[in-house]
Image (tube, rainbow, N blue to C red):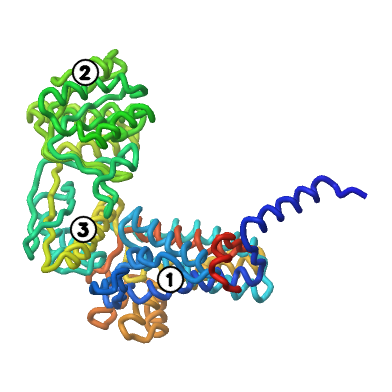
Amino acid sequence: MPKPPSQRSRKAALRHVLDRGRLVPAPRARVLLKSGFDIIGDAVRPTLGPAGRTVLVERLNRTESPEVMDDGATLARRIIELPLYRNAGGMLMRHVAWRVLDQVGDGTATAAVIAQALLHETTRSIASGANPAILRNGIERGLVEALEALETQVLPMDGFEHVRQIALAAGHDEEVADLIGEIHREHGRDIVICTQEWLARELSYEVADGCKWNSGFAHSDFITDAARNLAWSEKPYLLFTNVFVETAEQIVPIMQQVVAIGGREFVLIAPKISDTALATLLVNNRNGTLHSLGIIAPGAGAHRVGVIQDLAAKTGGRFLSADAGDRVEFATVDDLGECDLVWASRDFFSVIGGIGDPADIERQVQAIRAELDTEDAPYNREELRKRLGHLTGGVAILNVGAATKTEMVERRARADRAIKAVEAARAEGVVPGGGVALAALAKMLRANDPSTTLDERLGRLALASALEEPLRAIAENAGANSAEVLTTVSRDGGHLGYDAVRHEFVDVREAGILDPVNIVRVAVRSAVSAAVMLMLTEVLVIPKYRYLHANAKP
């Protein structure tokens, strides 16, 4: 009797999977994934907190000195591959750490510790017979409540001493933290800081006119600084438009004019740049004719036009408007702006040292202030305030020096983490640091429990226990009794925390032990997402080419 189509299709799909790789079913798959997850989690955990330890990483060239690092994300990135059947779990933890670093610049060790603890707790519950799907429901409902409760703990970043404390907590470099605090004190809260390496051994900074916008390069092939995934353009001519650039013919004429006047750099900022136009820009880069950079215009909707007008005013250019009937192919050199430097990442770009007429910039500032006086919608007011900050702020170039090239690279990475943490705190505020805010969330989850089933309650308790883990790790790394520290902090339920440097309990607000709220939020959300993903995984498939050459068994 012939088999039904559904059964034949299932067998064909299974045969297809087996032809491509080796299949490891549950429960063995879950054990192997957790093992890989724990390998990287255990490596990152000692770096958490102000008294965190360092990790020594041997280089590929064994004659070079090993790297000494205290950054969880960079450490995870150095681990390229784990043993065959444990690699998938390890690479997921690696991805979590790097994603947190990419989004907010800090919190990678916190995310790793929470994710590892949550997976450990849920694995025990599943082994005792709990339903993974219902556990997930309890965890996800608890996460929503925890993130809502986190917002109630937010405090504004108050004073420049808080700037220094946050920079020190993120970068673990007192000299860098002191300089970042000084920059904010001297040049205001709207200052944007970026770093560069230089040959001297000490630190210094210089301030240029400019600011940073929330948008990035149009294609990764524009990257010129592969180590930091940045694209740079020095002394460029800039074209600003809200016209969609869809063909090469639109931009070739203006690029030819730039070459004719001796220009070597060209930056196009537009809301959409087609693949054809991008190819034209990239071909010029490869040929060395005119180094070009395409950037997606920042802003959305009606605010995008205003943001592009701000950029044009900062650099002395003219905004080519689709509503006014302007066409990119008819642009001339007189329409272009100029500046000292443009850098762009995947999510941000900055224009530094624009040559715009101060009178034009002031007119733009006054126009924005006039709109603020009549605008009632909170979202529109916030967007207008951002534009005002971009026009009135500046950019500080932090020159990072050290005795050796290796130390310089490592110190610059610490400075970048510190700067991102300060920006995060400035944007959304801070919460009690040192694991105190997370411990308070755990206490709330245990006290307010609307769970309808036992498995949901187990999921909620697993999340609560995981949120306490960063405080435990900070205490352990400082050589303290983690159980005693956790009990004391949880009993207080306020702002009492453990100072891992002075080895005493303090009011974390008065001591300046604070964390940017969006770093905490991103770390918790990323950690829970990764742990739940592994918790629900039943089957592991190893690519065929790997297990054929590894000669390994699960």
Seen in the image, is 140 located left or right of residue 200? right
Q: Which residue is mark 1?
A: 40
- Label 3–label 2 contact, CB within 8 A: no
Q: Is residue 389 visible?
A: no
Which disc, if any, is residue 158?
Answer: 3
- The kind of residue tagged 1 is Ile
- Sequence-wise first label, 3 or 1: 1
The amino acid type, in three-letter code, at marker 2 is Ala
User: Residue 51 location, x and y as percent?
Assistant: 27, 78
Packing grade of label 1 (10 A; few <14, some 14-19, many >=20) is many
Give the quarter of the image for residue 77.
Answer: bottom left
Image depth: mark 3 or mark 2 in front: 2
Q: Which residue is mark 2?
A: 331
In the displayed structure, does residue 148 sit left or right of residue 169? right
1 and 2 marks in contact (CB < 8 Å): no
Which residue lies at the image location 13% right of the left edge and 60% below the top edge?
400
Q: Earlier in the sequence, mark 3 or mark 2?
A: 3
Q: Quadrant of residue 471?
A: bottom left
Residue 407, percent from left and from top:
18, 67
Q: Is residue 368 above or below residue 494?
A: above
Q: Which mark is residue 374?
A: none
Is residue 521 depicted above or below 122 in this figure? above
Residue 139, position in %: x, y?
A: 55, 62
For the residues labelled 3 and 1, say whether their Cβ atoms are less than 8 Å apart. Answer: no
Instruction: Looking at the image, tell me whether mark 1 or mark 2 is earlier in sequence order.
Output: 1
Q: Residue at x 39, y 67 (%)?
A: 79
Residue at image coords 17%, 54%: 195
Q: CA distance from mark 1 to mark 2?
A: 54 Å
- Would you identify the image quadrant in which residue 156 lies? bottom left
